[in-house]
Amino acid sequence: MGIALGAVAMVGVALLLPNMVGCMVPGPAATQEQIGALRRQTTDSIEHPVSYLVAGDPARPRVIYVHGTPGDAGAWADFLVDPVVGPAASLAGLEGERAEPLESIAIDRPGFGMSEKRATVSFEEQAMAIAPLLVERDGEWPILVGHSLGGPIVARVAADHPDRVRALVIVGGSLDPVLERPGLMQRIAQGGVVRAFLPRALDNSLQELKVSKRETLALAEQLGHVRCPVIIIHGTKDSLVPYANVEYMERMLANAPLVEVVTLENQGHFVPWEHPDVIRAAIERLAAMP
């Protein structure tokens, strides 16, 4: 009986994988050697320590990258191997001079990568885990970039810390509670038999998706506190996070001084790996704003 149940569970896992947000992704172009050469650090939070990769100039303003579900810091490797270069006031008007790269941080969210093993499904708690990384440099607070489920999480950080976030880039963000509908295989895999065979990251991802509607509903009450510029990047052919999320974000981010939408026609969900140039351009534009 145990072998039979195990076989059924493994079939369930095989069917589940294509339905998981972020599982079957193109991935970064950076090599494992390049990723391995990046510096790794951990926040000193007692409750939710976060492991992260870091690159760029530690004296420059920060860009913080937040992955979706499942995933880890390596999803943003291309943005750390070749960090975005922002403007430098001290170099203004000096032709031929090049500013140093912005300090770039990609986190392992709680439950993923090298951060703590237990999933932290609450957006509020995830925002608390990221908060220690919100530091001021050159008079500027960090720009936060979130993909997929990372989108609502960076929005929660900005809502909870409106004076410590300079701007947001939300890429394929899943914020609309009405559109949070777990698929059939996700519901099946939440059962104990199948969960026993899931890797930690997939199991933690399921737990996040299970409560995503609850968490986006809670986030909806906080979005009015977001008071920084926001650039939304979304593909019209995103089958994992529908483009309809864009209209919701435009409506709910009413107090943001700027909400700009970059629509990518016929683009799916995996913008960070298929159109990184669009994300880089958004970061550069926000970093140049006074």
Image: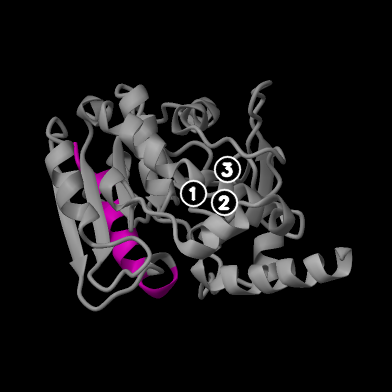
Kind of residue indicated by mark 1: Leu
Question: Outermost residue toward the right?
Answer: 2
Give yes or no for contact between labels 2 and 1 (Cβ–Cβ under 8 Å).
yes
Q: How has the structure been colored for display?
A: one colour
Residue plotted at (12% across, 34% down): 254
Viewer-closest of 37 and 234: 234
Q: Quadrant of the C terminus?
A: top left
Q: Is residue 285 visible?
A: no
Kindly indicate whether the residue at mark 3 contacts the one at mark 2 (C-beta within 8 angstroms): no
Q: Amino acid at mark 3?
A: Arg
Q: Pick the residue in front: 170 or 164.
A: 170
12 horizontally vs 163: left or right? right
Under tag 3, what secondary structure? loop
The earlier-in-sequence mark between 2 and 3 is 3
In which quadrant of the rendered view does residue 123 lie?
top left
Pointer 3 residue: 109
Q: Residue at x 41, y 69 (%)?
A: 270
* Percent of width and height locating residue 52: 62, 44
Residue in the picture at 68% in, 41% down: 115
CA gap, disc 2 and disc 3: 14 Å
Q: Which residue is mark 1?
A: 209
The residue labelled by disc 2 is 206
| Residues rendered magenta in the picture | 273-290
Q: Earlier in the sequence, mark 3 or mark 1?
A: 3
Q: Residue 133: horizontal and vertical position, in percent?
A: 51, 31
Tell me the amino acid under the disc marked 2.
Leu
Q: Give the secondary structure at mark 1.
A: helix
Q: Magenta stretch: dominant SS?
A: helix
* Distance between mark 3 and mark 1 Cα atoms: 14 Å
The quadrant in which residue 37 appears is bottom right
